[in-house]
Image: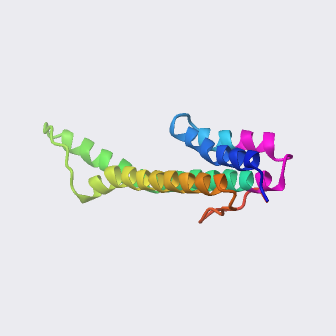
């Protein structure tokens, strides 16, 4: 049986990942610090801390890779528009590759951010109830 203090601390470990929406890398650093401070107090806090850190590291990696995949499309759209400016036109073409390269990357990364937000809230609520929570699609960096 988990104590209320353990449940509250597990909640704080998970919810601290929301710092990533306000500070660069805050979603990784905040749960890592909370976990390091509390991991020796109980096996439950150690397990939930590892889950939170692994999840946030995984999502950072997913967003980084997704961002990298859209760089070639974005660069292509810039060069294509720069070559059109040579003809004294001030037109900026928004054809399919340009829209996909610019807005597509931003929207997919935004959707990933929304999914991350929902999963963090779900994990925090479960941890506050004393339930074990395993994040989906998580790479186990810390075992």
Seen in the picture, residue 62 relative to 17 is either above or below; the reply is: below
Q: Is residue 136 visible?
A: yes
Q: Residue at x 64, y 48 (%)?
A: 14
Seen in the picture, residue 64 relative to 36 is either above or below; the reply is: below
Q: Residue furthest top?
A: 23
Seen in the picture, residue 136 relative to 57 is either above or below; the reply is: below
Q: Residue at x 73, y 51 (%)?
A: 49
Q: Is residue 35 magenta?
A: yes
Seen in the picture, residue 56 relative to 136 is either above or below; the reply is: above
Q: Nearer the viewer, residue 9 or 51?
A: 9
Q: Nearer the viewer, residue 17 or 7?
A: 7
Asked whether, in this view, residue 99 is left or right of residue 54, the answer is left
Secondary structure mainly formed by the magenta segment: helix
The region drawn magenta spans 32-47
Quadrant of the rendering where the N terminus is positioned:
bottom right
Q: Nearer the viewer, residue 49 or 129?
A: 129
Q: Is residue 5 magenta?
A: no
Residue 134 percent location from the top left of the image: 66, 63
Q: Residue furthest right?
A: 40
Q: Residue at x 21, y 51 (%)?
A: 94
Q: Residue at x 26, y 41 (%)?
A: 82
């Amino acid at each position: 049986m988990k104590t209320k203090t353990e449940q509250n601390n597990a909640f704080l470990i998970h919810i601290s990942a929301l710092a990533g929406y306000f500070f660069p890398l805050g979603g990784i650093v905040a749960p890592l610090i909370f976990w390091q401070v509390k991991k020796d107090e109980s096996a439950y806090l150690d397990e939930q801390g590892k889950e939170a850190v692994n999840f946030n590291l995984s999502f950072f990696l997913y967003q980084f890779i997704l961002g990298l995949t859209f760089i070639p499309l974005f660069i292509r759209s810039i060069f294509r528009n720069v070559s059109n400016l040579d003809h004294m036109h001030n037109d900026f073409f928004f054809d399919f590759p340009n829209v996909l390269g610019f807005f597509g990357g931003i929207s997919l990364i935004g959707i990933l951010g929304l999914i991350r937000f929902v999963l963090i809230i779900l994990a925090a609520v479960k941890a506050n109830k004393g339930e074990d929570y395993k994040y989906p699609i998580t790479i186990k960096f810390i075992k």
